[in-house]
Image: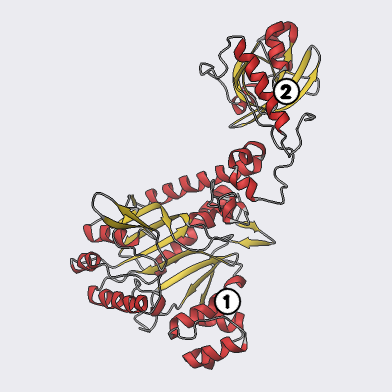
Amino acid sequence: MADNENPPLDESNEQIDVRRQKLAKLRETGALVYPNDFKPTHSSADVFRTATNLSDEDLHATPRQVRVAGRIMAMRRMGKASFFQIQDRRGKLQIYARKDRLGDEPYALFQSMDLGDIVGVSGPLFRTKTKELTVEAQELRLLSKCLRPLPEKWHGLADVEARYRQRYVDLMVNPEVREVFEKRSRIVTLLRRFFEERDFLEVETPMMQPIPGGAAAKPFITHHNTLDMDLYLRVAPELFLKRLLVGGFERVFELNRSFRNEGISVRHNPEFTMVEFYQAYATFADLIDLTEELIVSLARAVVGSLQVPYGEDVIDLTPPWRRLTIREAVIGHGGATEAELDSVAGLQGFARRNQLKVDAHAPYGNLLVEIFEQVAEAKLIQPTFMTGYPIEVSPLARRSDKNPALVDRFELYIGGRELANAFSELNDPADQRQRFLQQMEARAAGDEEANPIDDDYVRALEYGMPPAAGEGIGIDRLTMFLTNSPSIRDVILFPLLRPQR
């Protein structure tokens, strides 16, 4: 059905004034202008299910009465009879309004309605000559007046920030945007089910912490007045979740909001969502298998295929996924030689030769990872488990038995972006305290992302934490992947933006 009454995108004060005048006239009649007593009996999807197996003759012989409500998204006025379309949480539905059926006063009210108004309708179902299922309005009520005209070309705005700032309009006029967030909700539901079916316990840990830890990130700082103490919005729930391993909860997970005082980009938002999970008597190798199983199950449920379109690529999630070490990636994707990767001087020379920006004073492990991120990360399109991480960049991970300069850790990359980070957990309290001390040295040297010492966490380890492995998966980035969304702002309902001037 054609929509021939969309206003131009640039709203005018005149249009808003006209709508407010209509509302004022309605108030003058003594009518309740924002009623809250209309109770729908059907959603649009319910209506279509009701009539699925009914012929036109069935609908005529035994009328099916429905009560529906929604926002007017299109109108076609034709004198004494008109069609309009409403949209509710489940879709769109056509309504037929006739003056001789509604009566003069209700039909006059309809004639004054605008696109965007929220209405309640009751009446029988029928099919038009073009076989479109329609409700014939016997009752029509204005439930909420839309005082601002709906935009005509909202989705194609050059300034996409307008869509993010006014997400309520974005959701209203773009069904594909609503679909993304419906899929996000389904992803979270499926994640919960996946872990619960494997005997993981869902828990909640503090979002305000006296000591920030669990990730290399700069925290947000707040202050508790009564206790007169600074607190930090958590950068990760890791250290509290591992305290629960000490306490005897052998399998735990948390769907959590975390906060990092860092830049904003297509893949970063200061407030973001993760799932973190920890399993006693497991290794990072066990979590590789579990992660494959998890993401494969999500893709089948949400996308319906293991061939997932993402940007210009099609990601093949068919297991097993590629395994690659950091060194192998820098050699294969960056063109480095084995000799260049054997020393700080060799890495610095490679960086200069390739005009890479690196910290000239960084230790070997940090330098290697910096180079990897610049020369290889964006090229990891198909699912790849990266291993061989240096101990310098992994202060909470267990040392490798084969090479104590490395840790038992992986990061998962899909579409050139990190989706998950996991490792076998460090449960030696002496080793952990020494790692914290090294982090404090890095802080003193100016690294604001280095972890401070958490004495209580070390004390917890001294009670004995079982051997375990843990992992964090970014829900926002996972949703980006499974919905083919180019920016993290497309999968966060209200992303952080600069204030409008």
Q: Quadrant of residue 459?
A: bottom left
Q: Position of residue 427 (x, y in %)?
A: 27, 70
Residue 87 quadrant = top right
> Please, is residue 290 above or below residue 322 in the view?
above
SS under mark 1: helix
Q: Residue furthest left?
A: 463
Q: Which residue type does callout 1 highlight?
A: Gln
Describe residue 299's horizontal placement relative to residue 312 as left or right: left
Q: Residue 118: x and y, percent?
A: 62, 24
Q: Is residue 42 above or below residue 337?
A: above
Crowding at mark 1 (Cα within 10 Å: few <14, some 14-19, many 20+): some
Residue 23 showing in the rendered view: yes
- Seen at 63% across and 19% down, the residue is 23
Indicate left or right for 374 with 468 as reference: right
Q: Residue at x 36, y 54 (%)?
A: 253
CA gap, disc 1 and disc 2: 54 Å
Q: Quadrant of residue 472?
A: bottom left
Q: Which residue position is annotated with label 1? A: 374
First in residue order: circle 1 vs circle 2: 2
Amino acid carrying label 2: it is Phe
Q: Residues within 10 Å of mark 2 (few under 14, many from 20)?
A: many
Viewer-nearest residue: 403 or 81: 81
Depth order, front residue of 487/384: 487
Which residue is label 2 attached to?
84
Position of the N terminus by quadrant: top right
x and y percentages locating residue 314 in the rendered image: 66, 61
| Mark 2: secondary structure | strand
Q: Is residue 79 depicted above or below 369 in this figure?
A: above
Q: Are marks 1 and 2 in contact (CB under 8 Å)?
A: no
